[in-house]
Structures are given as structure tokens and as C-alpha cells.
Image: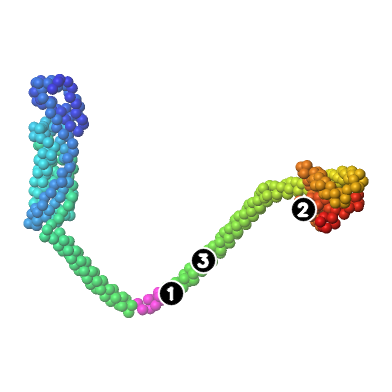
């Protein structure tokens, strides 16, 4: 052990012995300087110890066996130097459990001694007295050991023979008996006194009938007058109270009606504001957007209608002009070729009719190809129908076939040769 300071907490004490000390140095909850080798330091606990003091089957002064349980709080007193020195002499080097055992045995002995000097009734009825005696006797004994009894309380009293229960029953029976005796005595006294009073009353009545009758009459008259006055005042008070209550109720009803009218008015205003708000919201979110959309769609439909009409009219006019031009060109070309064929026919009169027909038939595909050439070069064709004629490819095919069907008649006019008849005959 090296030299230096040694410390301890407030729940323990240092005991330094050896050189420089005539008696041990006691330091409760602090520190001190210790020289190693020539001084020795020990510790002793100052904690409060809780003890359950059991005293089973102890005979009281009446010879009745009972069992008692007490709770005690004890501790080594660190503030008193003499008691702390005494405790060091008694318990230094012992564990806290050993100290508790010594204190418990001492307390249990004193508790048994006090139980033997008192009756069961005294212990049961006056627990405070019993606890005080145990506390005083045990304290005086434990102080000599340096231990202070902080508190002592009687926790429980019990017996195995049922004495306490019998004591309670006996006491209960005694109380009931005293009550019945007192009641009987009271009834007897009352009966005697009633008889004496009745006797005196009858004697006085026999002696003073007239006065009694007069007094009774006066009393009845005064009582009747008093009763009339009291009843009148009472009736007036009740009527006034009922009238005032009716007025108060009426005023309360009127105020409640006013409150309901105000509440209803406010509700109507709130509903009107809500209806106005919803109408404006509907106007802003539904009607106006719907009208704007309707107007936009109408304008778009009208514009599309005008555009379609104008396009149809323009395309119809263009088709008409183009058709007339193509028809004129085809007619002119056919006429030129026909004139050429006529000239060839005149030049070759020596050929037979069959040779001429053969020549016409050889030329016929070229004519038909020339008739269909303008249609094959057209990129876009717009057809306008009145609903009573064909449209689309059927219409174009019919136009081409109509032009091709006129070729035999044209050949016959120019050459006086009927191609269709010759073809059928062949």
C-alpha cells in the first residue's frame, strides 16, 4: 500500500489506527492521509438496515400464545463519535449481514419480553403503546453497541388458537348484551314516567276541566286564525312564485326564439352565399368554357364547310375544264387520224375491204391507248356526284369505254366500213 489520501462515501466511515493515534481516528464520509506500513485503515458501513422481527408463539401475561411481526429500521450512528467508536469495537471487520443478525436477535428478544409482560387485549388494542415500549427497551440496549433504532412498527398480530377471534366475538356479545339491557331499562323508565305523567294529567284534568276547555277553545280559535293567515300568505307566495316563474319561462322562450330566428337568418344567408358561390363557380368552370368551346366548334365547322365547298367547286370546275380539253384533244386527234386513214383508204382502193379492216384493227389499240393517256398522267381527281350516277373508278372506266365505243361509228363515217359487223361476221 502506497502512502496518500484515502476517501469514503457518506454511507461509510474510515477507521485509521496505528502510529500517531492514541485511539482510532474515525472519519465518517470524508478523507484522511494514511502512512503505509505504520497505519492501518478499515471501513465500517453506515447504511440503514431494515429488519423484520418475527416472534412466533410467545405466551402473554395471560398465558395465551400469539405470534407478532415487527418492522425495525436500525443503523450505526456516524455523527456521534462515542457511538461510532463503540460500534467499531463491536462490529469492525464484520460484514453487514452479521451486524444485521446481531441487531435482529437483540430486537427479537426485547419484543418477546414485552409480549410476555402484556395481555393480548393490550397488544391488540394499543399497538402504539406496544411499539413504543419495544422501541425504548431495544434502543437503550442497542445504543450500548453503537446502533441507533431509527423506527419500530408493529406489523401483524396472529394466534393459532383463535383467541383473537373469540375475543372479538365475546366483545361483540358483551356490547349487544349491554345494548339490550340499556334498551330494556330505558323502556321501563319511560313506561314508569309515562304512567306518572298520565296520572298527574288525569288528576289535573279532573280538577281543571273548565279551564282546560276554555284554554282549548282559545287555542283552537287562535290556531284557526293563525292557520288562515299562514295559508293566505302561503297561497300569495305560491301564486307570486308561479307568476314570476311563468314570466321567467316566457322571457326565456322569447329569447330562445330570438336566438333561433337569428340562427335561421344566418343559415339562410350562408346558404344564399353558398348558392351564389356555386352559381359563379358553375358559370366560370362549366357554362363559359362550354359556350366558348361551342362557339369554337361552330366556327371550325363553318370554316371546314366553306373550305370543302370551295375545294369541291374548284375541283369540279377544274375537272370540267380538263375533261373538255382532253375530249377536244382526243376528238381532234381522232379526227386527224381518221382523215389520214381516209386518205390511206383512197390511196389503197385496190385493197379489198378485209385488208382495210385489218389495218383499222391494227390501229385501234393505239387509239384506245391515246384515249386513256390523259387519265394515266393525272395525279389527283376529285369526283362530284349528285347521287344519281356512279362515282370513283366505275365512273372513270365508264367514260373511257364510252369514248372507245364511239370509235367504230367514227370509222364507219370515214370509211363506210362497219367494223363491228365485220368482226361479228368473222
Q: Which is more N-terminal, label 1 or label 2?
A: 1
Give the camera-side residue of 282 and 207. 282
Instruction: Indicate the secondary structure of the residue bearing disc 1.
Output: helix
Q: Tell me: 255 left or right of 72.
A: right
Q: Residue at x 42, y 76 (%)?
A: 217
Q: Tell me: 417 left or right of 90.
A: right
Q: According to the image, label 3 marks what residue?
A: 238
- Give percent across and percent down for residue 157: 15, 54
Q: Residue at x 56, y 63 (%)?
A: 246
Residue 168 in sight in this render:
yes
**Dominant secondary structure, magenta:** helix
Q: CA distance from mark 2 to mark 3?
A: 116 Å
Badge 1: few (under 14), some or many (20 or more) residues near its Cα, within 10 Å?
Answer: few
Q: Residue at x 73, y 49 (%)?
A: 294
Which quadrant would residue 65 be assigned to in this image?
A: bottom left
Circle 2/circle 1 CB separation < 8 Å: no
Which quadrant would residue 213 be assigned to in this image?
A: bottom left
Q: Which is more N-terminal, label 3 or label 2?
A: 3
Q: Nearer the viewer, mark 2 or mark 3?
A: 2
Q: Quadrant of the C terminus?
A: bottom right
Instruction: Indicate the secondary structure of the residue bearing disc 3.
Output: helix
Q: Residue at x 10, y 35 (%)?
A: 94
Circle 1/circle 3 CB separation < 8 Å: no
Q: According to the image, label 2 marks what residue?
A: 394
Question: Is-magenta flag for residue 213?
Answer: yes
Q: CA distance from mark 2 to mark 1?
A: 139 Å
Q: Quadrant of the N terminus?
A: top left
Q: Which is more N-terminal, label 3 or label 1?
A: 1
Q: According to the image, label 1 marks what residue?
A: 220
- Give percent across and percent down for residue 275: 66, 52
Instruction: Indicate the secondary structure of the residue bearing disc 2.
Output: helix
What residue span does the magenta drawing correspond to? 207-216
Amino acid at each position: 500500500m502506497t502512502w496518500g489520501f484515502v476517501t469514503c462515501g457518506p454511507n461509510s466511515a474510515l477507521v485509521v489506527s496505528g502510529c500517531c493515534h492514541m485511539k482510532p481516528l474515525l472519519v465518517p464520509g470524508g478523507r484522511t492521509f494514511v502512512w503505509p506500513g505504520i497505519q492501518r485503515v478499515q471501513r465500517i458501513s453506515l447504511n440503514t438496515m431494515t429488519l423484520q422481527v418475527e416472534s412466533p408463539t410467545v405466551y402473554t401475561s395471560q398465558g395465551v400464545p400469539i405470534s407478532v411481526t415487527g418492522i425495525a429500521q436500525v443503523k450505526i450512528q456516524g455523527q456521534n463519535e462515542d457511538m461510532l467508536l463503540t460500534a467499531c469495537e463491536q462490529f469492525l471487520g464484520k460484514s453487514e449481514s452479521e451486524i444485521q443478525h446481531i441487531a435482529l436477535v437483540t430486537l427479537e428478544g426485547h419484543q418477546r419480553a414485552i409480549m410476555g409482560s402484556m395481555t393480548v387485549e393490550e397488544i391488540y388494542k394499543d399497538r402504539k403503546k406496544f411499539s413504543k415500549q419495544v422501541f425504548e427497551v431495544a434502543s437503550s440496549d442497542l445504543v450500548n453497541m453503537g446502533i441507533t433504532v431509527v423506527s419500530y412498527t408493529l406489523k401483524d398480530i396472529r394466534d393459532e388458537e383463535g383467541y383473537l377471534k373469540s375475543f372479538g366475538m365475546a366483545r361483540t356479545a358483551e356490547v349487544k348484551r349491554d345494548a339490550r339491557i340499556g334498551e330494556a331499562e330505558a323502556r321501563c323508565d319511560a313506561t314508569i314516567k309515562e304512567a306518572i305523567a298520565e296520572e298527574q294529567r288525569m288528576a289535573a284534568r279532573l280538577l281543571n276541566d273548565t279551564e282546560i276547555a276554555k284554554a282549548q277553545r282559545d287555542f283552537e280559535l287562535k290556531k284557526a286564525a293563525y292557520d288562515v293567515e299562514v295559508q293566505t300568505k302561503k297561497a300569495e307566495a305560491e301564486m307570486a312564485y308561479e307568476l314570476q316563474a311563468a314570466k321567467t319561462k316566457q322571457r326565456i322562450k322569447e329569447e330562445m326564439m330570438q336566438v333561433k330566428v337569428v340562427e335561421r337568418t344566418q343559415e339562410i344567408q350562408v346558404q344564399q352565399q353558398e348558392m351564389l358561390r356555386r352559381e359563379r363557380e358553375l358559370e366560370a368552370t362549366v357554362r363559359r368554357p362550354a359556350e366558348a368551346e361551342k362557339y369554337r366548334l361552330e366556327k371550325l365547322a363553318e370554316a371546314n364547310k366553306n373550305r370543302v365547298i370551295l375545294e369541291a367547286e374548284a375541283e369540279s370546275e377544274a375537272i370540267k375544264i380538263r375533261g373538255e380539253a382532253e375530249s377536244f384533244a382526243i376528238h381532234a386527234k381522232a379526227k386527224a387520224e381518221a382523215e389520214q386513214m381516209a386518205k390511206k383508204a383512197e390511196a389503197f382502193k385496190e385493197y379489198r375491204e378485209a385488208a382495210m379492216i385489218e389495218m383499222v384493227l391494227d390501229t385501234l389499240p393505239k387509239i384506245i391507248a391515246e384515249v386513256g393517256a390523259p387519265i394515266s398522267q393525272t395525279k389527283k381527281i376529285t369526283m362530284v356526284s349528285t347521287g344519281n350516277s356512279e362515282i370513283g373508278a366505275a365512273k372513270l372506266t365508264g367514260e373511257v369505254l364510252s369514248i372507245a365505243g364511239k370509235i367504230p361509228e367514227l370509222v364507219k363515217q370515214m370509211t363506210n366500213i362497219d367494223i363491228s359487223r365485220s368482226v361479228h361476221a368473222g
